[in-house]
Amino acid sequence: MTEEKSHPSKESIEEFLGAFKMASERKRLGLLNRLEERVEELLGLGSTLMSGFDPGVCDWTPGFILQVIHKTDKDFIRNTLNCDNLSWFDSPSDVGFDYSPLQRFLLNESYEDADRFTSSKLRELAGEKAVKRGYVYFSEVDSIPSIDLSTLDKLWVVYSRGKFGFTVQAKILDSLGGRYDKLWPRIGWKKDGIWTRYPKAFNWSIEAPNGHMPLVNQLRGVRLMDALLNHQGFKAKS
């Protein structure tokens, strides 16, 4: 009598998503390809796809899922998830700014456009003088509303698998003992003592080094970057 071999059944997409959510960040990063391979099953969940996620939380897992499904079905987020402007994540502003364009750029991995938008908004948030001169002084950073700076940071984090954002740059700096001379080459802003030329020499893709984006004008020196990374809005989170 031949013994029948039992084959474990393939876990349902709901089971896979549940395990994915609960996994460590390192394990989730190792499962990204498997998640992409099951995109049709993700789409099959319809309006319930994002029910287990909170749009107010800074979590890159739902951001990655949104990017995956958007590549396959450009209408799903707008029609099935009822996000007319493709903005699923909460993006509050203390001054009434609309950050939906940034969400769209990041959703589509249009990182250079997202970076330009971020720079523009930082100037607007810093005040009329910063807009006129075309850049922000370090002394103007404290006046930027914490809510808006946190929103900019959150959107970068959630749509980059946790690779980009001001808080990511701050963590890298901290791991380097606060040494900016080590930070610049680590995040790809400087190589062999030479500043990376903007914009063509920068890597505008998810393959860029951690902390590569958003950019801060290096010509303004350490003080501007230091003011941003040590903003009271970020300090309150840590």
Image (cartoon, rainbow, N blue to C red):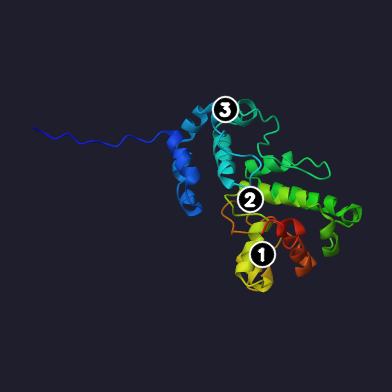
Closer mark to the observer between disc 3 and disc 1: 3
Q: CA distance from mark 3 to mark 1?
A: 41 Å
Which quarter of the picture shows residue 12? top left
Earlier sequence position, callout 3 versus callout 1: 3
Relative vertical location of residue 12 with respect to residue 21 in this rendering, above or below: above
Closer mark to the observer between disc 2 and disc 1: 2
Q: Are marks 3 and 1 in contact (CB under 8 Å)?
A: no
One can see residue 109 in this view? yes
Q: Secondary structure at mark 1?
A: loop
Amino acid beneath label 1: Trp
Which quarter of the picture shows residue 229? bottom right
Find residue 165 and report its horizontal and vertical position in percent: 66, 54
One can see residue 135 in this view? no
In this rendered view, identify the residue nearer to me: 163 or 135: 163
Relative vertical location of residue 195 with respect to residue 160 in this rendering, above or below: below
Find residue 115 and report its horizontal and vertical position in percent: 71, 51
The residue pinned by badge 1 equals 189
Find residue 208 and report its horizontal and vertical position in percent: 59, 56
The residue pinned by badge 3 equals 47
In this rendered view, identify the residue nearer to me: 192 or 115: 115
Count of numbered marks: 3
In this rendered view, identify the residue nearer to me: 215 or 232: 232
Mark 1 Cα-neighbour bin, 10 Å: few <14, some 14–19, many ≥20: many
In this rendered view, identify the residue nearer to me: 66 or 199: 66
Amino acid beneath label 2: Val
Kindly give the residue lying farthest to the left in the view shown: 1
Q: Secondary structure at mark 3?
A: helix
**Residue in the image at 69% along x and 29% along y:** 84
The residue pinned by badge 2 equals 157
Q: Is residue 31 left or right of residue 186?
A: left
